[in-house]
Image (cartoon, rainbow, N blue to C red):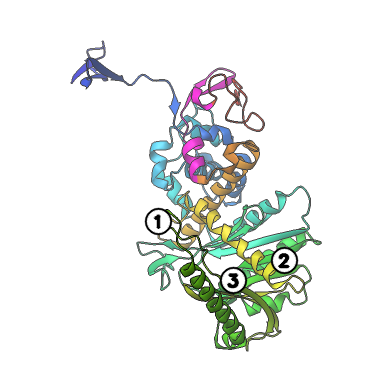
């Protein structure tokens, strides 16, 4: 390897290298004179985050610093942090090496030639500056953003609720051992719109908590806020058995706008009530299985050696009313009894739905399984990384990840509407859009941003949309 030095013999600054034998018959020369290139080109598609929920979160944070010495506003810092999360950089440590990035600067409303963004220590101080009142205001902001996303009040919305684990590996406050996951962790509560997949609210909770009571109080506040915004809207809760709360069901009794369909943990009383139905289903399965075996023995297998007979499965749905000792009112319960060669599976659902058939109610409940995909999408932003010592700081981090998810969701369904990008997972969005390389050149009156030609193709329609995004050779940012 040989080096080529500058003509200035005083500095003798190394600017290029020549690597021999990298390719047979050719040398490769590397220098450091490339123009301004960013690997986070998707940020220019997102535009300035100051006008999104990220900027509004920053404006909610009280600033007690000396205003004459401020170089980075809280709104800019939150936008910087959310923009980094959008590109897959989940930690505050990434601020140090990304603060010079031109695309990141533009995402917070700065020009490429402006001063660098904040460093890791400054960002960490912000995360540890948040108090309980500010966290509460940010939570209400998420509800407001969700309500404002509708052009008019909907007739019916479904709130899919679930929690997930965020494992911890230090001495974080309220990091408790969860026996189900076998780890010390936090348990964030996530609320999604069951019809669209839009994130409504994310709340950080300790690793162990009384779900029945604490979740009920949270949900009551959410329902009351949305009912105040939409007085004629029916709001339905859908969740697993963790969200079957007699406090919530009692509270919802006289409220016409509140509905619920949640799982119900089985107990001896419930199993006794369906004992006869279970025997009937098992007898039916044995009869069908014997008939199948007799037909199988009387017919030869196909030439390829595979049996053509289907697997026997018996599935039955029933409804009845049940009142637990802790319940103030009896509730309608749906039971699904499924018998197969793997055994008997019994599932219960409690619902306020008094009209639909048992199978219809259970199939409606089963659609909540799609929420697992939305939680997975959220975790593509490393939303389960809780590295701060303080519980409040980690709570604020959950809001930052939720803000990044909200911005990405809006990008997919607004900028990239009716394109293949709209169906991307967040993982594909990060890798194929957000981490696109761009060449940035700042002129006197505009900033020119050039993407790689493979984003449009040669002689083919543009893979990226022009509506809400950018047309070919368009000026995205005006000059200062």
Q: Position of residue 7 (x, y in %)?
A: 26, 10
> Dot 1, crowdedness within 10 Å: few (<14), some or many (≥20)?
some
Q: Quadrant of residue 356?
A: bottom right
Q: CA distance from mark 2 to mark 3?
A: 14 Å
Ranked by sequence position, the earlier of labels 3 and 1 is 3
Q: Looking at the image, tell me whether mark 2 or mark 1 is earlier in sequence order.
A: 2
Name the spot of residue 34 as percent of width and height, x first.
Answer: 39, 20
Front residue of this view, candidates 71 and 103: 103
Q: Is label 1 in a helix, a strand or a loop?
A: loop
List the single residue furthest toward the left: 1
Image coordinates for residue 394, horizontal then vertical, percent = 47, 58
The residue range painted magenta reads 427-455
* Residue 309 versus residue 247 in the image, above or below: above
Which comes sooner in the sequence, label 2 or label 3?
3
Secondary element under disc 2, as helix, strand or loop, is helix
Q: Position of residue 257 (x, y in %)?
A: 77, 67
Residue occupying the point 58% across, 82% down: 278
Whether residue 206 is visible here, answered yes or no, is: no
Snapshot quadrant of residue 211 = bottom right
- Above or below, 24 against 332 in this view is above
Locate the N terminus and report the quarter of the image it occupies: top left
Question: For the residue labelled by badge 3, is the local secondary structure a helix, a strand or a loop?
Answer: helix
According to the image, label 2 marks what residue? 224
Gap between marks 3 and 1, in whole Å? Answer: 25 Å
Q: Is residue 85 visible?
A: yes
Query: What residue is shown with label 1?
Result: 387
Residue 364 part of the magenta segment: no
Mark 2 in CB contact with mark 1 (< 8 angstroms): no
| Residue occupied by mark 3 | 215
């Amino acid at each position: 390897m040989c080096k080529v030095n500058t003509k200035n013999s005083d500095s003798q600054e190394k600017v290029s290298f020549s690597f021999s034998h990298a390719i047979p018959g050719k040398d490769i020369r590397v220098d450091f004179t490339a123009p301004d290139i960013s690997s986070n080109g998707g940020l220019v598609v997102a535009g300035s985050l100051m006008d999104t929920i990220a900027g509004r979160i920053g404006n909610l944070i009280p600033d007690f610093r000396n205003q004459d010495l401020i170089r980075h506003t809280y709104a800019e810092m939150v936008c910087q942090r959310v923009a980094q999360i959008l590109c897959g950089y989940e930690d505050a440590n990434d601020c140090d090496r990304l603060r010079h990035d031109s695309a990141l600067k533009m995402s917070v409303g700065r020009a490429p030639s402006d001063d660098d963004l904040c460093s890791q220590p400054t960002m960490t101080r912000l995360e540890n500056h948040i108090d309980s009142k500010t966290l509460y205001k940010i939570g209400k902001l998420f509800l407001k953003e969700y309500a404002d996303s509708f052009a008019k009040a909907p007739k019916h919305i479904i709130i899919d609720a679930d929690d997930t684990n965020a494992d911890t590996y230090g001495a974080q406050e309220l990091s408790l051992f969860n026996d189900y996951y076998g780890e010390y962790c936090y348990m964030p509560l996530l609320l999604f719109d069951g019809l669209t997949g839009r994130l409504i609210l994310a709340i950080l909770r300790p690793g162990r908590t009384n779900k029945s009571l604490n979740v009920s109080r949270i949900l009551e506040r959410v329902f009351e806020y949305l009912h105040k915004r939409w007085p004629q809207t029916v709001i339905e809760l859908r969740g697993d058995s963790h969200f079957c709360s007699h406090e919530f069901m009692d509270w919802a009794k006289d409220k016409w706008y509140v509905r619920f369909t949640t799982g119900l943990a089985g107990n001896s009383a419930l199993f006794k009530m369906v004992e006869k139905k279970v025997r009937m289903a098992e007898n039916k399965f044995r009869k069908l299985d014997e008939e199948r075996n007799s037909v199988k023995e009387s017919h030869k297998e196909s030439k390829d050696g595979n049996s053509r007979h289907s697997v026997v499965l018996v599935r039955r749905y029933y409804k009845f009313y049940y009142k637990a000792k802790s319940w103030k009112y009896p509730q309608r319960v749906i039971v699904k009894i499924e018998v197969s060669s793997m055994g008997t599976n019994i599932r219960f659902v409690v619902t306020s739905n008094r009209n639909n058939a048992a199978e219809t109610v259970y199939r409606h409940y089963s659609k909540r399984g799609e929420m697992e995909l939305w939680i997975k999408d959220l975790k593509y932003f490393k939303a389960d990384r809780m590295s701060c010592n303080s519980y409040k700081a980690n709570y604020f981090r959950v809001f930052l990840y939720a803000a990044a998810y909200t911005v990405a969701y809006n990008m997919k369904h607004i900028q990239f509407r009716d394109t293949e990008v709209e169906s991307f997972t967040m993982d594909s969005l990060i890798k194929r859009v957000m981490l696109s390389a761009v060449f940035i050149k700042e002129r006197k009156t505009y900033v020119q941003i050039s993407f790689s030609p493979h984003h449009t193709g040669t002689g083919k329609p543009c893979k990226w949309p022009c509506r809400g995004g950018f047309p070919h050779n368009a000026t995205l940012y005006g000059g200062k």
